[in-house]
Image (spheres, grey):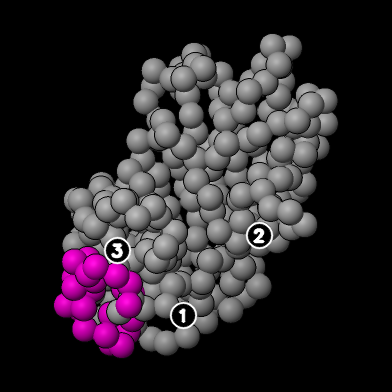
Amino acid sequence: MQLVLQYDGSRFAGWQRQPATVTVQGAVEGVLERLFERRVTLIGAGRTDAGVHARGQAAHVRVPETWNASKLRRALNSLLPHDVWIAQAHNVTDQFHARYSAISRRYTYQLGTDEESASPFRRRYEWRLPWQLRDESALSAAAESLLGEHQFYGFAVRGTAPETDQHRCTVTYAGWTRRGGRLDFTIEANRFLHHMVRFLVGTMIDVAAGRRKPKSFLELLAAPNNLAVSPPAPSHGLFLDRVTYPAHFYLEGV
């Protein structure tokens, strides 16, 4: 069965189950084990870092035949902590895999640029920029350069992918949107590397703030390592928006 989860990542040490720390996977598995009365493994589409939020994380779990999608969703939402919610549950084929069956993932990063972004109701979910942007148009130019296939060695944490991995990602959408006093960066690709979105945002903001040259962003797209990348943007502004799968995996249609 596929679950689509929303969560506030503020108090979690990321998605992946870890000993002696609170994680999203661990919280949901704990409730599933109460319901099924057996050990359960919940496989996610990706491992969001500590502090990262989700509006559309996907996961799959093998369930007893006595449970259907609507029944399981209701039961989970009645027992899960307040900062985790099952938005959808779907019956899928046995071949479905939350990670390997995905064809794209979409993330949004939220930045606060006005005085009101200091509000406690916004700064929990936005990176309040500590400096002014001198050239906001540079953000769109940098985002446009991401489209297509690139090797993202320059925007990934070293050593977190296998030695044989070429760090290739195909970006199908990348763009910035102004929403009053907030700036949103949205990107969709077939895969993402560790810290990739946060490195991209941190570097683009440095370009727009005049802290580095625009050509340095393009150079990083061709770089063999991340030695010249800007510090990553903070985790609390990042949201996993959705994970997309081929329709043939769904038994009831979506």
Which mark lies nearer to you, 3 or 2?
3
Q: Is residue 107 above or below residue 185?
A: above
Where does the magenta region start and end? Answer: 203-227
Residue hosting label 3: 153
Between discs 3 and 1, the one toward the N terminus: 1
Residue 58 within the magenta-colored segment of the rendering? no
Nearest to the observer: residue 172 or residue 162: 162
- The image quadrant of residue 101 is top left
- Is there any visible trace of residue 183 in the rendered image? no
Image coordinates of residue 105 in percent, x first then y, are: 40, 44
Amino acid type assigned to the residue bearing label 3 in the image: Tyr
Q: CA distance from mark 3 to mark 2?
A: 25 Å
| Secondary structure under the numbered disc 2 in the rendered image | loop
Q: Residues within 10 Å of mark 2 (few under 14, many from 20)?
A: some
Which amino acid type corresponds to the residue marked 2 in the rendered image? Ala
Q: Residue at x 73, y 12 (%)?
A: 66
Residue 214: where, in percent of width, then height?
Answer: 20, 78
Q: Camera-side residue: 192 or 57? A: 192
Q: Which residue is mark 1?
A: 129
